[in-house]
Image (cartoon, grey):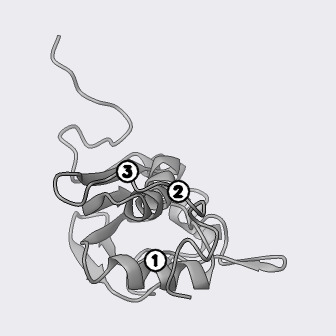
Amino acid sequence: EGNLTALGCVAQGRRRLGDGRSSEVYVTGHSLGAAVATLAMCWLDEAGFKVQLSYNFESPRVGNEVFASTFSKVFSRKVPVYRVTHWRDPVPHLPPETLVFWTYRHVNYEVYYDDRGSWRVCVEQEDPRCADKWNILLTAFYTAQHCKSPLSMDGSLCHCAVDA
């Protein structure tokens, strides 16, 4: 524990690509892209890039408890990592915390926006004061919430408003 390569999240023997001086990167993603961004942070860090900041929107759970706690140890002290969730979006509840013999956990930290646009930061994984206050059965009827965000100019993370 404490090393993402040892967990198998990063290929062993990977050549260090970042030079440690000018290879700063910012990472973001939405939905599956947020899950990929979380995993990419592991690879980028091991490859020598300086991950500076990460905002991931409506991410599903990416790994188990060991992955989530190791990720937090590696990144939370040196990189602001924010997993942004909105009201009853069902995607952050996938996969379920327990699925047959497997368990899944979110990485920290969560910034939760409610249906009025008020927000709070939750520092605990699966914090019942944030998105985890809704169970997966209650969120299943709110799939239209997945793209909505008070942070986007047109209210949607899925459509980019472009002036013609």
Q: Quadrant of residue 13?
A: bottom right
Q: CA distance from mark 3 to mark 2?
A: 9 Å
Q: CA distance from mark 1 to mark 3?
A: 21 Å
Closest to the camera, between mark 1 and mark 3, is 3
Position of 80 with respect to 107 (left or right) is left
- Considering every residue shown, the one lying at the far top of the view is 164
Amino acid found under the numbered disc labelled 3? Leu
Could you tell which of marks 2 and 1 lies nearer the N-terminus? 2
Q: Dot 3, how many residues are within 10 Å of its Cα: few (below 14), some (14-19), or many (20+)?
A: few
The dot on residue 14 is: 2
Q: Which residue is mark 3?
A: 17
Residue name at image x 60 percent, y 71 percent: 63
Q: Position of residue 36 (x, y in %)?
A: 50, 52
Residue name at image x 64 percent, y 76 percent: 104
- Is any part of residue 156 visible from this angle? yes
> Is residue 59 or residue 137 the one in the foreground?
59
Where is the C terminus found, in terms of image quarters?
top left
Q: Which residue is mark 1?
A: 71
- Considering every residue shown, the one lying at the far right of the view is 100
Question: Vertical placement of 156 versus 126: above or below?
Answer: above
Q: CA distance from mark 2 to mark 1?
A: 19 Å
Q: Position of residue 140 (x, y in %)?
A: 61, 59
Residue name at image x 45 percent, y 61 percent: 38
